[in-house]
Each structure stands twice: as C-alpha cells, then as structure tokens.
Image (spheres, coloured by chain):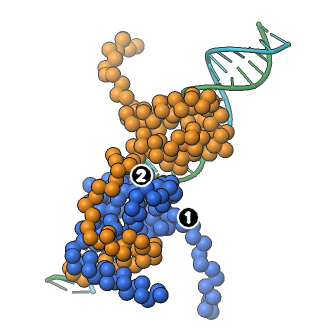
Chain colours: A orange, B blue, C green, D cyan
DNA sequence: ACGCACTGCTTGATATGTCAAGCAGTGCTT
DNA sequence: AAGCACTGCTTGACATATCAAGCAGTGCGT
C-alpha cells in the first residue's frame, strides 16, 4: 500500500483562468436571477442542459460553443458579447476596433459592396496576383 | 444507359447557408493570398490543418471554433470579426449597427494591396457595376 | 421518520470538431 | 514516360463538447 505519498505537486488547475472567470460569472448571474440549473435549462427551451451548465460554471469546458453562450446570455439578460469576452473569443478591443491602418481603398466605393461584388473582387484579385507571378 | 438525365434537382445543400458563405469566403481569401491549403497550415504554424481548412471551405463544419477562425483571420489579414460574423457568431447588431462606419468585408482583406492592384480593383469594380445596371 | 420535491453535481454515451495519413489528379523536369 | 513535387480532397482515429440519466444532499410538509 502506498504510504502517504507526499502530494507531489499542487494539482495544476486543469482549468484555464479564462474559463474560471466565465464559470463564476455564469454562476453569479444565475444566482442573481434566482434560477436553478434546471430552471435555466427550461428557460432556454432545453437548448442547454443543466448538466452542461454545471460544467460551464465549474470551468470544465474549454471552448463552449458561441451558440450556447448566446442562449445563456438571452436568459440572463446580459449582452452576448460579455460572455464571448469572458470565454476568450473576443479581441482585446472589440469595442474600439476602428484603429486600423486603413488605406485609401476604404474611402472609396468599397464601403458598400454587395456580397456578390465582394466575391467577384476577391476572385479578380486572386487572378491579377497569379498573373504577376 | 442514361439518356441525358434532366438534372433532377440541385443537390440539396447539406450545408447551412451561413457556412457556405464562410466557406466560399475562406476559399476566395486563400486564393487572393495565393496560398495552398498546406501553405495556410504552415502559415498558422500548424494550428489549423489543411484537411480541416478544406472542410471549412466546403462548408462541412457547422460550428468552427473561434480560436481557429482567429488563426485563419491572422493569416489572411482579415479582421477576425468578419469571419466570426460569417460563421454566424456575431449578433445582427454587431454586424449591421451604426456602431461603426460600416466596413464591409473587402476593405480589409486587402489591407496589403499595392497601389497598382488597388487601381485595378477599383476599375474592375466600376466595370462589374456598370454591367449590372 | 418518511417521502417528496427540490437542489448541484458526476458519469457514461453520443455527436461533432480536428487532425495525420493517405489517395488521386496535374503539371514540370528529366 | 516516369518520376517528382505540388495540388485539393477523403477518411479513419482521436479529442472534446454536449446531453440523458442517475446519485447524493437539503429542506419541508405530513
């Protein structure tokens, strides 16, 4: 029998800090709403299971799908972006992303392209570039 | 023997429209960059496999993980949000809101255009637009 | 005390994302 | 024409997300 194995290392937190934050946030939100795990499951029309929400809150899920976060956000009446942020899916500055080295092109007609035009343009770009080579 | 089978139906798109859009966009972007599937895999330091990128482009992935989209966005020099949007992960508001000077997708990808390419593109845009009218 | 309706939580099964390895095609060089 | 270096693509295996079902605890009404 093993003899008091001296706890070799502080069990590395299997859970990234990001998730932990998301977890506690979710737990707090739920508490604030006064809902049970099953209550939330019900509120999302069973889109998210109580079991899964539990794991989310305990930080056991590493990459929760945005779709689920969206459902949850709706129930807690919290902006979806917040959850996405805590999950680590947003860029550092999602709010102020307009600081980009923009070139003249943007100033022009490019501003309002239809999806179709966009596609055509990209293909054309691929074409002229392949030509250059 | 088959006698000019009258193309019975456009094969039901096994793929939700959203994904298809993301797929073709990814393909176009890659083409524009002149990269091969493996080239992209390499460019992301093998963070995304060529096999997976292929499936993404063909719309076979329903919920691609944002982390991967982020890697890809970096390689194509396109804002991460654009891919997230096409993947259906952004809220309608984030996409269309007056929040920002509506940067349409294309303004971007082309962050690294030469002046010559830019001119060509604009001319081409004028062309396809005149055609439509 | 018993049961019952809750609670949060774990767990085994399933779905789906993701990749390594391979296949078939295409062009280029010899 | 044979080999090679590419290409896009499929596929079988593995990892992870997600859920249905169950377990243990807590309070509460009888």
Q: Position of residue A11 (x, y in %)?
A: 36, 24
The image's mark for residue B63 is none
The mark that comes first in sequence, 2 or 1, is: 1
Left or right for C15, reference B100: right
- Picture coordinates of residue A53, whole percent (x, y): 55, 36
Residue at horizontal 43 percent and vertical 52 percent from the top:
B65
The chain letter for the residue carrying disc 2 is B
How crowded pointer 1 is (Cα within 10 Å; few <14, some 14-19, many 20+) is rated as few
Query: What residue sits right under mark 2 in the picture?
Result: B66
Residue B16 is tagged as: 1
- Provide the secondary structure element on which disc 2 rests: helix
Residue B40 visible in the displayed image: no
Which image quarter holds the N terminus of chain B? bottom right
- Front-most of residues B52 and A93: A93
Name the image quarter holding residue B100: bottom left
Q: CA distance from mark 2 to mark 1?
A: 18 Å
Q: In front: D23, or B23?
A: B23
Q: Are marks 2 and 1 on the same chain?
A: yes
Image position, residue B26 (x, y; %): 39, 66
């Amino acid at each position: 029998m093993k003899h008091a194995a001296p706890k070799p290392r502080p069990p590395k937190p299997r859970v990234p800090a990001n998730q932990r934050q998301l977890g506690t946030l979710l737990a707090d939100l739920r508490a604030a709403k006064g809902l049970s795990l099953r209550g939330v499951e019900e509120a999302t029309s069973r889109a998210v299971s109580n079991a899964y929400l539990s794991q989310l809150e305990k930080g056991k899920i590493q990459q929760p799908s945005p779709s689920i976060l969206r459902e949850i956000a709706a129930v807690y009446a919290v902006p979806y972006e917040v959850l996405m942020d805590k999950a680590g899916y947003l860029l550092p500055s999602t709010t102020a992303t307009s600081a980009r080295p923009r070139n003249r092109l943007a100033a022009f007609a490019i501003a309002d392209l239809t999806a179709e035009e966009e596609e055509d343009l990209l293909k054309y770009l691929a074409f002229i570039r392949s030509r250059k080579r």
